[in-house]
Amino acid sequence: MDLTYFVDATGFSKPVCPLPKGGMHWIESRLTLPDGHGIERLLARVGMMPDLDHATEWDLMIFDDVKEEFEPIRRWDIHDPHQSAHPFQARVDGTNYYYIFPDFRVPEDLASVCDLSQYEAFSCLAGDGKWRGRESKMDREETGRVRYTWRKGADRLYERRLDELVEAQKLQRDETWARLFDFETGALLSRKLECEAWNQFRKRWIAFFTDKDKPGEVWFAEADTPLGPWGYGRRVVTHGDYNFYNVAHHPSFNQDGSRIVYFEGTYSDTFSGARTQTPRYDYNQIMYRLSLDDTRLVLPVAVYRVRGANGLTHLWLRDQVEAAGAWERVERVAWFALPPHCREKGLVPVCANDQEPAVLSTASARLDIAPVFAGLPLVETESEVTLDGLWNCRAEVSDGGGPLNFPLQMPLQGTTVRVGESWNAVTGIGRFDQGKLELTLTNANEPMTFTLEARVKGRTLEGEWRENNGLAQGTWSASRADRTPPERRSPALAVLREYRRAGNGGYDYSIEVQPPPGCLPEGRPICRVWKVPGSVLTLDWKAQPVPGRRM
């Protein structure tokens, strides 16, 4: 990056926000807009922060290109705490908006940005949408379901406020919007969606964020609309005990049709458990590059339950909903599943008929139609016997000595086994053929060589060992370390079942323990899919990428 630095008369970097007020001056929400003369100007929000928990005020400032510094144009008597904001743009019903956060937006013109009454919050607060602490009232439908809507002039429900509503039992935990699960473990992420943008390669809105309980880690997620539904995030960076915050995605740096993206953050031992500082890197910015075609970034997407004609339903992904213009008929997210283009070995492609009501079947039974989504098999199995991989071994000694536990990584090339230096400086070479293993191990630290023989029995090896040129011998066994990816063992997985409606009324599909209303109790298992993290439907389907903007 070819950077230009603003410097003073001595050549040192100069202050660009010289406010006389005390405390920290936190510049965020940088955006560009034309002024009254049509000249593009740089604006930012600046918080006056005596501490990290609240602000004495917020100022809207504009950059003076001649003075090379920000000057205040509006003062706001608001005291929200600091949260890093990296605005993105979207068009809604012909109007361009700056989204300061995914749930807080303003029309993209200077007059609106200067007027707090023109800002809109995605809120479930009743009435005028103003925050009244634990006395705040929720907007709910007659069924009791909480209702989120865009409200002009409403207060933003940032994470701390949502937590307070949960503590006051005004909201259930799963009624808070933008809930995400860890794709690997199924654990709920305490996320802050710090930066978001439309990505042309993924054809979805992508976000990078940190988890407040794991401050040194960065996560990636994607959704069909700027508000979600967010389902599952994948960790893409970890910094151990170090802190990494204020993550910023830079869409202007995208390469290769937005397949390659860049993001950065502040690397610091502040507010971390780091025992020592990293020389030359502490409190610096670090940028990362991410390839979005990496197969590890294939994440579950929402499968929508869509109301069709005569009260019947469709089970569609985003593409089918958009093609049918059916966003307003989406009832809920039924489950999450892998996208149909995912061709990973062992997946279960699931097809749906194009009639009503929906009937799902596996692709093996319906080769004439393309799958709608893919799930995991009901049981993880290994299709072939192979030695490749990590084995946990246990050797018993014939003279009654204690057993020895050790790992062996045994890469296989044809029928040849070559154990590189691993446990306790042990190396080895051998042969594996027709389920029989013959292996010679050598300890580099001691002049000792051992011969091991074994046969495969299911997922285990069992046989005998002996020390060459010695008397020691005994039996040994080994079990294969679980090679199943952690996401395939996640507690967030659920079995998708097909239920027959009573009275020959067709079929219904569910991942719930109880059958859907009006269905017979016995359900036919189809595959495994992923649970829905929250109980509320958060869709901002009218928001579209701004034409001509590089994303």
Image (spheres, grey):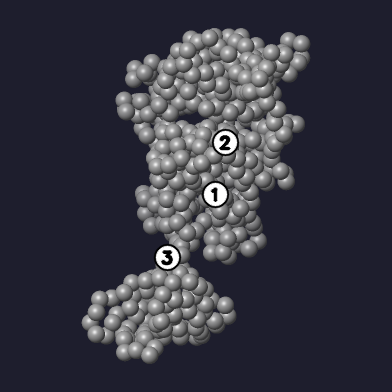
**Local crowd size for mark 2, using a 10 Å CA cut-off: few (<14), some (14–19), many (≥20):** some
Q: Which residue is mark 2?
A: 285
Alpha carbon of mark 1 to alpha carbon of mark 2: how far?
28 Å
Q: Earlier in the sequence, mark 2 or mark 3?
A: 2
Amino acid type at circle 3 is Asp
Question: Who comes first in sequence, dot 1 or dot 3?
Answer: 1
Q: Against 105, is 317 above or below?
A: below
Determine whether the residue tagged by mark 2 lies in a helix, strand or loop.
strand
Residue at screen point 24% across, 79% down: 401
Image quarter where the N terminus lies is top right
Q: Amino acid at mark 2?
A: Gln
Amino acid, disc 1: Leu
**Residue 237 pos. (x, y %):** 52, 46
Q: Earlier in the sequence, mark 1 or mark 2?
A: 2
Provide the residue designation for mark 3: 482
**Residue, x 47% and y 12% (percent of image)?**
22
Q: Nearer the viewer, mark 1 or mark 2?
A: 2
Q: Position of residue 269 (x, y in %)?
A: 45, 37
Q: Nearer the viewer, residue 218 or 449?
A: 449
Looking at the picture, tell me which residue is in the foreground, 520 or 373.
Answer: 373
